[in-house]
Image (cartoon, coloured by chain):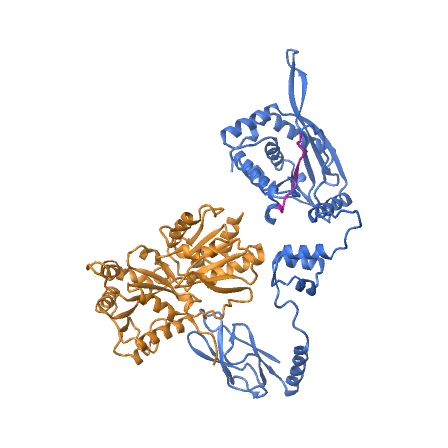
Chain colours: A blue, B orange
């Protein structure tokens, strides 16, 4: 059997019109015999048969057809055409082809594939265009009802649950903590905020300090692969935890080392607003290679966050505390400090590396002038 | 044979009908006589049927537009064809200082019913001086109305509307559109439908088959419809952004208020045009929208135009200058963040 594929007849048209068949269905045709007249916007052209055989046209006169479309078959024998007709008649009696009239967005299609959602379930939505949220609602509906007195967790919390379980199951984590004096950092943050008419504080400085480690300690930004090697990224893309009651989000600060303090603080402000509304785009949440977990509530001393699967470590920031120390002349003065934690994948780095990492963060934050770049 | 009509055929039928029904109608232009029938075949068959009123002319855009304006001044209804819109620059003086002025400078209104047809637009590899969209140069001239062909509007109705204004009109016709078929019965494709909105010269309103509120409303002239609808499809399927499109027939004067029922359903408005940026139709609409919808808009009107560049002949370079579906998709996705 030969397929007659409509050639591209000019550069202007996306579709042509089939004017008439020059041979009838079931006719024996010869090679190079004209089969059909096709009309473009410019002219009418005849399409010849590429070989000999029995013709069967698939497009009716007056219908549109496109370049590349198969408009006819030429069968080797009449019997082959009979067989083809029997098969297509049988197919025509089956119910309508699945999902041909439903349109799924990419997000919806991904969920449908992942959860094996049936076409019948999709049809029950009664919609022509099916979006991600429609499929999510469908998945929620098909779950068994919670036990009496039980409370069903929201979808986002179940998603968090899946991620942290995966982390605990696959990553042998160790942790180390360091105390960092932050008087200078806080005063610098205030200066920069005034200078740049923006608002920034320890989280922004810590993100910069973490990103600066990328050049010297790339392993902390790496991704452990199944073959035991570590894929090292080109830039520090720092995920920052945000939870303002609408779910836990970890938006990404891309190439954080290249951002100026003003850009960084404005980006974080934008992310906080989105966290408040629960309105992130997928692209803003994908692709971090290290995480900064903010636990900087007043009175909070230490935090041990979970490493995001696919990353090597997570840095935590605790709350600011105050204590009395003796200054050079032996007088008591008040000093402010925080605890910074590093939870790391012990398969990739060891305690010695972790201490070096934390010491560098401590140095940067205690002599913070270096962090105040206006680059970017 | 029952099939959908191409835009060039529809224009041709509209001109046939005009000449058949109105003995004061004329068609003038270069190389429009049969058997050639005009560079884009829009005037095919006209000269055989009406040889006395279909006049193939010398190569002088100023001359033939002047003759057209003279015919209009004497009470006739001429249609003048520019072979390419780019050449309408030569007719500018006749339109600015003679045709449009004649409507009102003689102390009483003189009906000046005439249409100047201008094949515009790129994406055909015709190069810098045969691909331009020059609408912006004709905006803001009193008593001169601007129209653009669309794949929605029947040109018979468009000609009726233009000639009933009793003032000169310029009809911009995107060359790519000539070979496209007209939409009918409210159907664009499997994903989009259209209906009519906004007054006695209706605007086509394209929307997805379901009725979610739009994230964006886009206003674009007819020549861009195909590219904008392509972007609307990918924005819906890839980004879940719901866009609706308004395609007006008349570009100037433009009454944005007539579109309020649609515009009030969104907080984001985008205006897309084919001409080069700066001093444009899109900016005029943006200004109207900012005045009319200031409190309702969540961000400034997004105006997308061609790059401020000549239009290269090489297809791959032309694509970078003239707006494409992908450019429109990217710009709207980015502006949504």
> Which quadrant is the N terminus of chain A positioned in?
bottom right
| Residue B41 in view of the camera | no
- Residue B240 position by quadrant: bottom right
Q: Is residue A123 left or right of residue B329?
A: right
| Residue A374 in view of the camera | yes
- Residue B114 position by quadrant: bottom left
- Residue A295 in magenta stretch: yes
Residue placed furthest toward the left: B106
Q: Is residue B137 left or right of residue B236?
A: left
For this rendering, which residue is in front, A348 or B73? B73
Magenta part of the protein: which range? A285-297
Q: Is residue B182 left or right of residue A148?
A: left
Q: Is residue A148 above or below residue B54?
A: above
Report how many numbered discs are placed on residues in the image.
Answer: 0
Task: Identify the residue shown where x is 47% and y is 54%.
Answer: B263
Q: Position of residue A171 (x, y in %)?
A: 75, 43
Q: Position of residue A27 (x, y in %)?
A: 57, 88
Residue placed furthest toward the right: A148
Q: Is residue B52 above or below residue A352?
A: below
Q: Position of residue B116 (x, y in %)?
A: 30, 65
């Amino acid at each position: 059997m030969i397929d007659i594929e409509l050639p591209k007849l000019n550069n202007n048209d996306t579709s042509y019109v089939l004017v008439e068949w020059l041979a009838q269905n079931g006719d024996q045709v010869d090679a190079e015999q004209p089969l059909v007249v096709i009309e473009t916007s410019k002219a009418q052209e005849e399409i010849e048969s590429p070989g000999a055989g029995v013709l069967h046209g698939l497009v009716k006169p007056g219908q549109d057809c496109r370049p590349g479309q198969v408009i006819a078959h030429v069968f080797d024998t009449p019997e082959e055409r009979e067989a083809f007709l029997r098969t297509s008649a049988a197919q025509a009696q089956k119910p309508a082809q699945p999902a041909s009239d439903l349109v799924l967005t990419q997000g919806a299609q991904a969920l449908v594939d992942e959860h094996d959602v049936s076409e019948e379930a999709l049809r029950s939505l009664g919609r022509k265009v099916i979006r991600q949220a429609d499929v999510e609602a469908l998945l929620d509906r098909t779950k068994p009802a919670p036990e009496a007195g039980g409370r069903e967790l929201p979808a986002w919390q179940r998603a968090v649950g899946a991620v942290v379980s995966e982390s605990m199951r696959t990553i042998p984590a160790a942790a180390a903590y360091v105390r960092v004096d932050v008087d200078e950092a806080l005063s610098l943050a205030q200066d920069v905020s005034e200078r740049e008419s923006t608002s920034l504080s320890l989280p922004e400085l810590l993100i910069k300090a973490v990103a600066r480690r990328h050049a010297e300690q790339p392993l902390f930004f790496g991704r452990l692969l199944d073959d035991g090697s570590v894929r090292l990224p080109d830039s520090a893309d720092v995920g920052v935890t945000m939870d303002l009651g609408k779910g836990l989000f970890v938006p990404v600060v891309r190439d954080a080392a290249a951002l100026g303090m003003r850009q960084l603080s404005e980006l974080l402000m934008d992310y906080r607003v989105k966290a408040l509304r629960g309105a992130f785009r997928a692209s803003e949440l994908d692709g971090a290679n290290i995480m900064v977990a903010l636990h900087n509530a007043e009175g909070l001393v230490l935090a041990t966050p979970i490493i995001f699967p696919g990353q090597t470590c997570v840095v935590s920031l605790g709350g600011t505390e105050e204590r009395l120390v003796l200054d050079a002349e032996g007088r008591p003065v008040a000093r402010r400090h925080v605890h910074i934690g590093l939870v790391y994948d012990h398969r990739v780095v060891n305690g010695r590396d972790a201490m070096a990492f934390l010491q560098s963060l401590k140095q940067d934050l205690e002599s913070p002038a270096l962090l105040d770049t206006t680059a970017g | 044979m029952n099939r959908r009509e191409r835009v060039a055929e529809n224009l041709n039928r509209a001109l046939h009908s005009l000449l058949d029904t109105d003995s004061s109608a004329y068609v003038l232009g270069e190389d429009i006589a049969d058997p050639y029938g005009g560079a884009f075949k829009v005037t095919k068959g006209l000269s055989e049927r009406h040889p006395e009123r279909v006049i193939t002319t010398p190569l002088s855009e100023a001359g033939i537009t002047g003759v057209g304006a003279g015919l209009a001044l004497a009470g006739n209804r001429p249609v003048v064809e520019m072979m390419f819109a780019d050449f309408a620059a030569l007719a500018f003086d006749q339109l600015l200082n003679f045709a449009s002025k004649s409507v009102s400078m003689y102390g009483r209104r003189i009906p000046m019913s005439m249409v100047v047809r201008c094949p515009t637009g790129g994406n055909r590899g015709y190069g810098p001086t045969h691909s331009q969209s020059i609408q912006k140069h004709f905006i803001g001239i009193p008593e001169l109305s601007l129209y653009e062909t669309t794949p929605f509007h029947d040109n018979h109705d468009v000609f009726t509307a233009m000639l009933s204004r009793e003032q000169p009109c310029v009809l911009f016709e995107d060359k790519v559109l000539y070979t496209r078929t007209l939409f009918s019965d409210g159907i664009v494709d499997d994903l989009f439908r259209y209906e009519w909105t906004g007054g006695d010269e209706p605007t086509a309103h394209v929307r997805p088959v379901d009725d979610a509120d739009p994230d964006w409303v886009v206003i674009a002239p007819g020549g861009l419809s195909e590219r904008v609808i392509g972007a609307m499809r990918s924005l819906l399927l890839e980004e879940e952004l719901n866009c609706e499109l308004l395609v007006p027939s008349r570009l100037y004067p433009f009454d944005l208020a007539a579109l309020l029922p649609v515009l009030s359903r969104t907080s984001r408005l985008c205006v897309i045009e084919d001409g080069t940026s700066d001093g444009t139709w899109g900016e005029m609409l943006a200004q109207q929208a900012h005045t009319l919808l200031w409190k309702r808009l969540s961000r400034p009107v997004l105006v997308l135009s061609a790059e401020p560049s000549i239009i290269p002949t090489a297809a791959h370079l032309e694509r970078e200058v003239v707006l494409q579906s992908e450019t429109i998709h990217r710009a709207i996705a980015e502006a949504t963040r």
